[in-house]
Amino acid sequence: MTEPILIFFALICLIQIIFHWSVFVKILKKRGLKDSEHKSVSVIIAARNEAKHLEKLIELLDQQNHPNYEVIIVNDRSSDKSRNILHKLESRYTWLSSIHIETLPQGWTGKKHAINKALEEAKNQVLLFTDADCIPNSKNWINMMTSGESDIKLGYSPYEIEPGLLNQFIQYETLMTGLQYLGFAESGKPYMAVGRNWSIQKASYPKNILESIKGFEGGDDDLILNHIGNSASVETVIDPSAQTISKPKSNWPDYLKQKIRHLSVGIHYNQKHLTRLGVFTLANVIGWFFFLIALILGFEPYIILIIFGLRSLSFYTIFTRVGLKLGTSPNYWALPLLDLCYSIYYPVIGISAWSAKNIKWS
């Protein structure tokens, strides 16, 4: 029985290495974008009870170098001072407009309806999406995310670095997600965008798909791309100046609730995308399971350590280099622990997301 088990374990690790060097490494080969003629841009932001973030965000948007943009903020049933703040800022900035929603139409969830209302008002050629608690990482954010001829641009949006284990895991999980959706997009197999930082030509935006998923809390970014990614030209933008920086959750319950909401739409992905992601995730989880069980039972420990060591060296090398290219710096010394935690976290949170009910956008 020893030989078949070792062969199976080696195969599981080999599958991971193939993903590392056939998909994730593509991010390292990505070159910077050339500047080109700038199209007019509509920046769309759905916000609910985001009064504490609005003034800082709008001040930074005012500093953008782009020659022709508007910003549409949809204030979705907020109970804080968002309305007053937006009215005050609209009188100061001519490029800013706000939409205030008091009631939610039947069948629509909050963010989908907010985006739909913004689409009705958007006047420009390109739609650029972000969230109210995100800030541009440079004055060239709009330029970088909207220039060129591609239908869709996928950006990266890391979280602020803060002390504590939760933030270390958030940094790891965010970069791990980036490895996958940016790497697959560079491989010609785009499957998701992140709503904190992506753009699309207005003429290419599928409003019919938005309406078909209007009852889902998530999916205004990933399900849209999942449906049209193969028929549209998709480009990744990984320069740090094209990023938005997001505020991370400060406690585990809020973070897990957020991730369950994000992952709850995964069951609706295209079957090919589900298969690719499932193979990689299962290989990662099974690899760690066999590794730990083999060490505990004393089963061929030296061979197991060599096989898993090669897998880990491959992954940590790619992970570190991509992190440096994206301008993010998780604690690399903690990678083995974070890697193990992720292999436990993902199946648990995935099962919770697929079975979750009454998920809400807050």
Image (cartoon, rainbow, N blue to C red):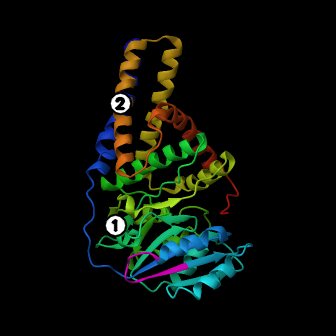
Q: Distance between the residues labelled 2 and 1?
A: 36 Å
**Residue type (three-letter) at the residue carrying disc 1:** Ser
Q: What residue type is labelled 2?
A: Leu
| Stretch of the chain drawn in magenta | 63-72
Q: Check disc 2 and report the residue beneath it.
A: 313
Magenta span has 67? yes
Q: Residue 168 carries which label?
A: none
Mark 2 vs mark 1: in front: 2
Q: Nearer the viewer, residue 165 or 111?
A: 165
The one of 296 and 167 positioned closer to us in this rendering = 167
Q: Residues within 10 Å of mark 2 (few under 14, many from 20)?
A: few
Residue labelled with disc 1: 231
Position of 64 relative to 250 (above/below): below
Specify which label sits upstream in the sequence, 2 or 1: 1
Going 38% across and 54% down the picture, which residue do you hit?
182
In the image, residue 228 sits, relative to residue 326, either above or below, namely below
Q: Which residue is drawn at 29% across and 40% down?
A: 21
